[in-house]
Amino acid sequence: MPNSTERIALFIDGANLYAAARSLGFDIDYKRLLDLFGERGKLIRAYYYTVLIEDQDYSPIRPLVDWLDYNGYTLITKPAKESSDQTGRRRIRNSTDVELAIDMLELAPHLDHILLFSGDGGFRRAVEAVQRLGVRVTLVSTTRSNPPMAADELRRQADDFIELRDLADDIKRARSAARPAPDSIPVPVEEYDDDDYDDDEYDEFEDGEEPEEQEEREAEQEEAEAEAGS
C-alpha cells in the first residue's frame, strides 16, 4: 500500500477489474474504492478505461461510465468493434491498453506511486518503463481465481502486489435484489471470454441485464426448449 505522503494515481483496466471481482463473487463499489485510496496517499488522478458500444439506444455500462465521470474519475473510452464467431454469436472487440500505457508514462514524472488495477501481462513493459523513471508500481488483481487473473510476468515486474480478495470488505458493493437506484453505482456488463480471458474480446449481455439475470434467463430458455422437444 502507498503511504500518506506519496503522490499516487489509479489506473483501472475496467473490464479486467470487473472480471477479477466477479470471479471472486463480489461487485466493486467505485466510491468506496476511491475513498480508500484517497486516504492512503495524495491522490492525483484516478483513470478508468473501457470500451463502449456506440450504436445502441441503451448501453448497460453507460450508467456506470456517467457516474464515474461525475465523481472523481477520469474516463478514457473507445468505441467497440463488433464481429460474429462461427456460431453467429456477436462479439465485442477493442482495447484501451495502449491508452492506459501512454497515460502512465506521461503522468509518471508527477507521481511517486502507481496502482495498476489489471492482471494483463501485456502491461509488463509499461510497468518497467515507469519504474525506470523512479515510480513504484503496485499491481491490484487476483491469483485466487481459476485461472488466475494476474499474469505471473506482471506480478514479478511490479514492486508490490495487492490481492483483490483482501480488499473486498473495503470496496465491495452491497448486493440487493432490487436494481440500483439512479444515484447508486451500477455494475459494468463487459466481461472476459470465460474460455481464454482474452482482454480484447467481450461477450455482449442483453441490454439492461446483470450477468446473473442473463444466466437465469438462458437456463429458463433451455428448460423450455427441452420440454418442447420431449
Image (cartoon, rainbow, N blue to C red):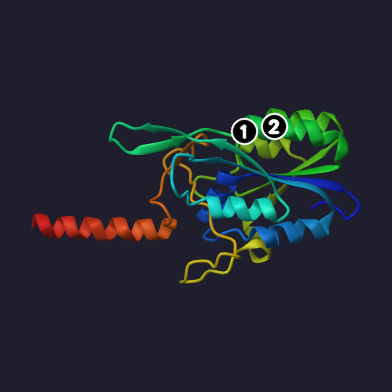
Q: Where is residue 66 shown, x and y percent of the image? A: 61, 52
> In the image, what residue occupies the spot 29% across and 31% down?
86
Disc 2: which residue: 101
- Amino acid type shown at disc 1: Asp
Most foreground residue, 143 or 14:
14
> In the image, what residue occupies the spot 35% across and 33% down?
84
- The vertical placement of 17 against 86, above or below, is below
| Other-residue count near label 2 (Cα within 10 Å), few / some / many at <14 / 14–19 / ≥20 | some
Tell me whether the residue at label 1 lies in contact with that at label 2, contact meaning CB atoms closer than 8 angstroms. yes
Instruction: Return the mark for residue 97.
Output: 1
Q: Where is residue 215 shown, x and y percent of the image? A: 36, 57
- Quick one: SS at disc 2? helix
On screen, residue 86 versus residue 173, left or right, reads left
> In the image, what residue occupies the spot 39% across and 60% down?
213
> In the image, what residue occupies the spot 24% across and 57% down?
221
Q: Where is residue 75 shown, x and y percent of the image? A: 66, 44
Q: Determine the image quadrant of residue 67.
A: bottom right
Most foreground residue, 54 or 88:
54
- The vertical placement of 228 against 98, above or below, is below
Q: Where is residue 6 shown, x and y percent of the image? A: 88, 48
- Amino acid type shown at disc 2: Ala
